[in-house]
Amino acid sequence: MFGVKTKGQTTLEVVILIGFVVAALIAMGVYIKRGMQGRLRDSADQIGEQYSAGNTTGKYTTTISMEQNESMQKGGHVDTTIVKNEQRKSGSETVSDFSLGY
């Protein structure tokens, strides 16, 4: 008779304890998410402004120069030797000021 009452009481205590643990984990989830977002934003801020296609303009000039020697052989065969092959790229890229909407 004594064991029957305590058995139901013990089950109720375990259910209430599990409920408190689940509620605590749900409440902590919000703070854990905020902490992770803060770390991610801090890391991005340390890198600097990120590339934005709509806010970036650039002007480049590419110069290519090549020298080659060709020699004609018997039977119409042509030997081609590339002596110099250079490519130069110069210019600038500008990221305009943009707000993130925060």
Image (spheres, grey):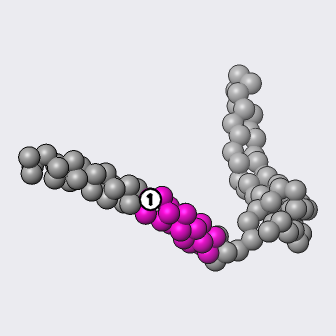
| Residue, far front | 1
Q: In the figure, residue 65 lies in which quadrant?
A: bottom right
Residue displayed at 55% across by 63% down:
30
Residue displayed at 80% across by 60% down:
52
Q: Which residue is mark 1?
A: 23
**In front: 20, or 27?**
20
Q: On screen, 54 above or below 94? A: above
Image spot of residue 45 (x, y percent): 67, 75
**Left or right of 24 in this view: 5:** left
- What secondary structure is found at the residue carrying circle 1? helix
One can see residue 95 in this view: no
Residue 27 falls inside the magenta stretch: yes
Q: In the figure, residue 101 lies in which quadrant?
A: bottom right
| Residue, far bottom | 46
**In front: 84, or 59?**
59
The range drawn in magenta is 23-43
Image spot of residue 13 (x, y percent): 27, 56
Image spot of residue 96 (x, y percent): 89, 69
**Left or right of 97 in this view: 3:** left
Residue displayed at 78% across by 52% down:
67
Tally the marks.
1
Residue displayed at 71% across by 48% down:
82
Q: On screen, 59 above or below 81? A: below
One can see residue 24 in this view: yes
Residue 76 falls inside the magenta stretch: no
Where, quadrant-wise, is the C terminus in this rendering? Answer: bottom right
**Left or right of 25 in this view: 68:** right
**In front: 79, or 13?**
13
**In front: 66, or 7?**
7
Q: Amino acid at mark 1?
A: Ala
Image spot of residue 59 (x, y percent): 91, 62
**Left or right of 83 in this view: 31:** left
